Image: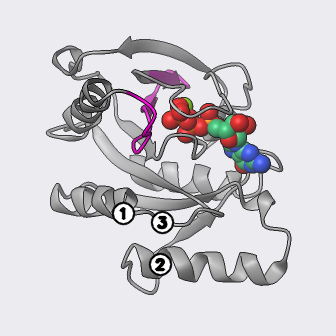
Amino acid sequence: INIKKAQLYKTVFKPEELSETPYKEVAFVGRSNVGKSSLLNSIVKNYKLAKVSSSPGKTRSVNFYFVNDKFFIVDLPGYGFAKISKTEQERWRSLIEGYLKNRDKLKGVFLLVDSKVGPTDKDRMMKDWLVYYGIPFAVVATKIDKLKKQSEKATVEKRIREGLDLPKQFPIIKFSAKTNEGRVEVLKQIERFLE
Ligand code: GTP
Ligand code: MG
């Protein structure tokens, strides 16, 4: 697909306000600071669309972006951010889960894993969760530009595959919002999800 246009459609802070949208959706999930909002900006080539921050916990709502007047990309808050209160963590969790559950229009999820950090327990939980709910997903290894050595790049895939207990052929897209490596692969996967 060719991204011609993308705009913020709605911002949701409460699970009960997550009403169905009229078009198909794909969503980005992952730890706080993993690069979800940066991936969105890179995909739509608008570096001001979603707010990005070096401190985790930037995205606090479920943000629906309407793309090409045809489908939605949904940017979610991150999980696993320890520096917020238990009640706020609980609120985010119910927001993320409330979104992912019983969502007819959701055609696929990108589970983002930091190339340097590797998969965490929370990522494994998220993966199990997606499998349990039968939501198609793809895995993106983010910030791949941070791995300078070719050997590190080669092992990142294996590390994520094993850490998340994924089958051998399961696609892991190596991505960088800095260099845009992997952007085309993400776009192709969006297309597959929306078919
Ligand atoms: P939350 O909204 O807090 O859940 O975070 P997020 O997953 O949306 O991450 P965000 O896109 O805000 O990026 C977090 C930090 O990582 C920012 O400082 C980004 O500039 C940086 N970052 C994101 N993607 C990349 C990348 O591909 N390479 C490098 N080097 N830095 C990146
Ligand atoms: Mg964000």
Q: CA distance from mark 2 to mark 3?
A: 9 Å
Q: What's the colour scheme?
A: one colour
* Upstream in sequence: badge 1 or badge 2: 1
Image mark for residue 173: none
Q: Quadrant of the N terminus?
A: top right
Residue 115 lies left or right of residue 134; in this view the side is right
Q: Amino acid at mark 1?
A: Asp
Image mark for residue 161: 2
Asked which secondary structure carries label 3, the reply is: loop
Q: Which is more foreground, mark 2 or mark 3? A: 3
Q: Amino acid at mark 2?
A: Arg
Asked which secondary structure carries label 1, the reply is: helix
Q: Provide the residue designation for mark 3.
A: 119
Percent position of residue 130, x then y: 26, 56
Q: Provide the residue designation for mark 1.
A: 121
Instruction: Tell me if I can see residue 2 in this picture.
Output: no
Q: Residues within 10 Å of mark 2 (few under 14, many from 20)?
A: many
- Which quadrant of the figure has residue 126? bottom left
Q: Amino acid at mark 3?
A: Pro
Residue at 24% from the left image edge and 31% from the top image edge: 90
Percent position of residue 6, x then y: 59, 22
